[in-house]
Structure formats: C-alpha cells, structure tokens
Amino acid sequence: MNQENVEVLIIGAGPSGSVAASYLHNSGFKVKVVEKSIFPRFVIGESLLPRCMDHFEEVDLLQPLKDFGFEIKSGARFMRGEEICNFDFGKKHGDGWDWTWQVPRADFDSVLTDTLIERGVDIVFDHAVIDVNIEKEKSIITIEDSKGNTSKITAKFIIDSSGYGRVLPRLLDLEKPSPLPKHSSIFAHVNDKNRPEGEEGTLITFDVLSQETWLWVIPFSNGHTSIGLVGPTEYLESFTGSNEEKIKQIIKLSKYYKNRFEDVSFDFEPKMIKNYSKSVKQIYGKGYALTGNSAEFLDPVFSSGVTFATESALLAAKLAAKELRGNQVDWEKEYYDYIKQGVAVFATYVKEWYTGNLQKIFFHRPENPEIKKQICAVLAGYVWDQTNPFVKNHNRLVKTVAKVIDMETAEQKA
C-alpha cells in the first residue's frame, strides 16, 4: 500500500480547501488536498459575500478569479409582492469590499484548483477519505479512489473542508442536530433566454412568497441562471411529480418571475436537499479543525455559506501553521470562540427572517438609512465588526426594531 507524509492534509478542494491550501503552500508547508469529485462538478453555494474577497486577496487567489469574468454582485434585492428592498454593498456601515460575485461553482472552483495546481499544490481528485486514525503526534488517513484502490497518508494536521461531505463529522462521530427549523430547498440552472437587458438581468433576487418560503434568482455571466425555492420541508414535499415538475409548479407561484422562466430549459434535472441545516459537537480537536459546511450550515437566505467556509479555512490554516511552527495555540479561544461569534450573528438573522421580524424591517417605509447601512454590513458578511450595533447587539436589536415598527403600525391604524 502506498504511503506518503505531509504536514497538512486538506479534505475538499472547494473555496474553503483552496484558501487553506493556498495560505499553507505560500507559507512553505507541505500540503496535500484530497477531493472526492472530479472537477468541474456542480455544487450549490453560488452567491458570495464581499467579506470573502478579503480571503481570496490575502492568499493571492483574487486575480485569477477576476480574470475569469464572473457576474458582479454589488448588492441584493428582496421582494415581497409589490414591496422591494434593495441593498447596495457600497452603502454599508464600516469599511470593506463593496462587491463580490455570483458564480457557477463548477467554473469558480475549477479556477481555484487550476491555479493552485499550476503553483505546485498537490491536489488529488476522485479520491475519498474513508478512515482517519488520530495518534499523539500525527494522523494516519486512508484514502480510496473510485476503483477501490487505497493508500495511506500521514499528516501532522487535518483541515476538513469537505462541505456537505462532512467527512470528519461522520468518521469521528461529531454530528449533532441543528437547532434551526427543518427547511429544504429545490433548485436548478436554466438557460435564461428571456433575461432582460441591463441591471434587471444581473440582479440577485430573493422573492418572498410567504413568511417561510422564498425563491432565489442568481444570474450568471454565462447567460444561465440559478433558481431555487427554500421553505419548510413539509411544504416542499407537498408538490407532486418529478423535481422538474415540482420546480415548474413553484415558478408559477412568483408573479414577478413566472413569465421569465415558464418556458426555459433546465441544464440538469433539478435537485433537492432536505433538512439542510447542520451542526457538530465540536469544530476542532487534537490534530484537526473543521471549516465551513463540514462544521455548520445555517441557511441559504443570506448567502453566508462560502464566506463562513473561507473565513474559517483561512483562520484554521493560520492556526495550524502557528502550531506546526512550535507555538502554543488556544483553539477554543482563537478558533471556536471567533467563528462561533460570526455564526451566532448570522443565526440570529436567519431566525428572525423566518419569524418575520427581519422582513418587517426590510419592507418598512420610510426606511431608516442608518439601520439599513448597519444591516447591509451584516449581509455583506462583516459579522465580526463590533462597531456595528446590529452585530454587537444582534440578539435583541432586530427584535426591538421590529417591535417599534409594530407599535408605529398600530398607532397609524388607531
């Protein structure tokens, strides 16, 4: 059986694994990335947030992504019937990037891995991690290709960036139920032949169909568009027929988009993910760290998935490098506490979206410009900025503002 030694083994070659690999490679460490799929491949998570641009820039992956020509995302539109709320990332609280991208992940992830391979990073595709044995000073990892051939890798540290593969949570019994409601999604890519010209044809939109159900529309620069519905699992299961028949029924529910998408062709059979929210008992341990969706996934409503993946991957890579250099790392404080702080902010916004409180704030008129700037910064992914009241006081401020709106509405009706 083949066996090799590396300093860091990274599981998964998506944005999370690529950011971690790039940082460690640039820092002089011997890294190996193991990816189960063969790229290019389809994966969800197509709407980025400005915060992740900081990560790509820091690890020198920004320019190749710019060169590809992905669709620019400078904000987001939320619709509820005739009501519209537009967020412009250029008008947010604090500093930071004011744009990002909307991306077909098959292309996006391939740009990242192609760049890393050109720079000498060892990435092996079509291999799955099937066993991990963590010892005192190292881990022995068994990988297997699609033909059943196995080999072993010895690594001093493991970064699990496997996303929905959730490799270490499965192998190390780290899974636990998510506290969030059981929601599911059904989605596909379409040939957007009826796409309007100009800004309307490029806007990412969240079309609110009811308090707990909403449709996403994410246009790409290649003329195709990602569409999908999110809602309670029971509601999605109430639609009959194939996934294609279901999503066609769903499109008809949107007064705004039903004509645009009624006769489009699907790039592939629409897919469904049931009960997508995930959690784990711990996000680090002796010799390993979990990043992104391999640790926790909240909800797609604010497109936080890739940003949390790259934020946690970059931090995990930095701390792993620090530890491998012989320095003490307090993983509880430096990793868990930090990541959990950002997750807690977004978890509040997800929860308050589905209670309706956040929707009240979005669609209330007249808008409060200062509140909108502060919420916009959260939606841009800057959820660690304690100068932002809607970050620092996220647990109570959304509820408080929604309550004030209710009181104002009641007074107006009186």
Image (tube, rainbow, N blue to C red):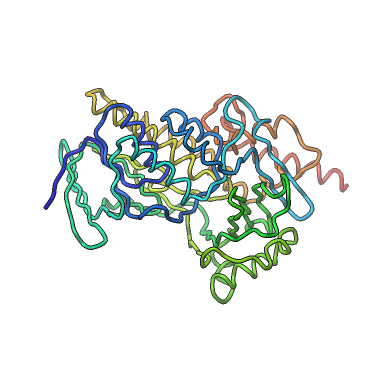
Residue positioned 22% across, 35% down in the render: 7
Q: How many marks?
A: 0
123 left or right of 387 in image: left
* Above/below status of 278 relative to 331: below
* Above/below status of 158 relative to 265: above
Q: Position of residue 264 (x, y in %)?
A: 64, 65
Q: Quadrant of residue 331?
A: top left
* Above/below status of 410 relative to 325: below
Q: Quadrant of residue 50?
A: top right
349 left or right of 110 in image: right
Q: Position of residue 51 (x, y in %)?
A: 53, 34
Q: Nearer the viewer, residue 215 or 402?
A: 215
Residue positioned 19% across, 44% down in the render: 134
Farthest-out residue, left:
1
Residue positioned 38% across, 43% down in the render: 113
Q: Position of residue 370 (x, y in %)?
A: 71, 29
Q: Position of residue 354 (x, y in %)?
A: 61, 52
Farthest-out residue, bottom:
241
44 left or right of 379 in image: left
Q: Nearer the viewer, residue 13 or 77?
A: 13
Q: Nearer the viewer, residue 325 or 4?
A: 4
